[in-house]
Amino acid sequence: MKEILQQYQKQEYKSEIHLNSAYIQPIKENDPQIQKGKQILQALLQRTVNYKVQDQVYPLKGSDVIKHASISKDGKVSIDPKDMQNEIAKINASQSTLNKSFLFKTHSGTVITVQGQSYGWALNVAKEAKQIQEAFENGQSTVVASHIYGNGWDHMATGFNTTTNNGIGDTYAEVSIAEQRIWLYKNGKMVLTTNVVTGRHDVGADTHPGVWFILYKKSPSILEGSEYGQPHYRVKVNYWAPFTDDGQGFHDAGWRTNWSSTAYLHNGSGGCVNTPTNIMEEVYNNLSQYEPVVIY
């Protein structure tokens, strides 16, 4: 085609143009270029990339995850990532924790199931597959998962670096709505427990069950919002540690007079975990940002 275009451009303006035929000869199977490309692709299929997700390592064999690939004249390999994406999706489905249920052993030793809420992580399948594709193309032998997302601020993931205790870890806050009590654990040991009052049950303002995490801590803080009987409130608290996006968290409640274990049924909070003033400072100091909060 190039030769024909060059002939055409040299032609004078006439009503008739005559060009000589030019043919591209097909490359045969035994051509050195074809044989070299074949060797490169065969070597590619023999490679293994070790894909590490948390403490798990998945040996990904080229012959298993590469079904479609091409090679350019200069020897550069290009791999279709679709099959790799399928493999990463399987790993993500089996290992990630985002929006899944957690097995949790309570203070009493009972094992329960608690639905993950803001706490948890998942793999960005497309970006992880791209990493692995590039590893195969560049001869890299190991890839560590790094494209992780979750339900936190800006889709931030939590718990990816935690593998113990079914992904919750050994440092967390436990909240029992039925018992109206919390337990704080550090490195597997309970460091504090106290009675609390959670969200008012009879008007549907219950504290949300699930596995959350401490978003941030602030002392002192001004809480503003609305709840049953108080369409607009603004109150100062000494300690504030929220764990849900809609404003539920731990805080002192100096105005509360009813601290009974049944107060939450008809005289509970707007959803927060009201904590006695005399112990809230200690609770606050034993909570950490991004720490799991298990509510059931």
Image (cartoon, grey):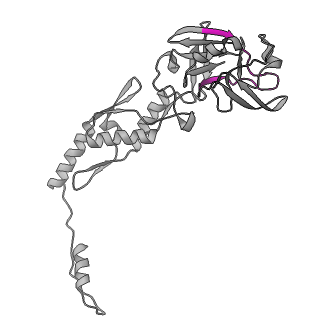
Q: Is residue 178 above or below residue 231?
A: above
Q: Nearer the viewer, residue 18 or 272?
A: 272
Percent position of residue 52, x then y: 37, 29
Q: Nearer the viewer, residue 132 or 200?
A: 200
Is residue 237 something that shows in the picture?
A: yes
Quarter of the picture containing the C terminus is: top right
Could you tell whether 193 is left or right of 269 in the image? left
* Extreme residue in the right direction: 229
Q: Residue at x 59, y 13 (%)?
A: 184
* Extreme residue in the bottom direction: 15
Quarter assignment of residue 251: top right
Percent position of residue 35, x then y: 17, 50
* Magenta stretch holds residue 119: no
Q: Nearer the viewer, residue 15 or 57?
A: 57
Q: Residue at x 56, y 12 (%)?
A: 185
Q: Is residue 26 above or below residue 36?
A: below
Q: Residue at x 82, y 28 (%)?
A: 228
Quarter assignment of residue 259: top right
Q: Is residue 89 above or below residue 162?
A: below
Quarter assignment of residue 112: top right
Q: Is residue 191 above or below residue 74?
A: above
Q: Which residues are magenta?
A: 192-214
Report the magenta stretch's main SS: loop
Q: Residue at x 21, y 78 (%)?
A: 21
Could you tell whether 223 is left or right of 117 in the image? right
Percent position of residue 131, x then y: 36, 40
* Extreme residue in the top direction: 108
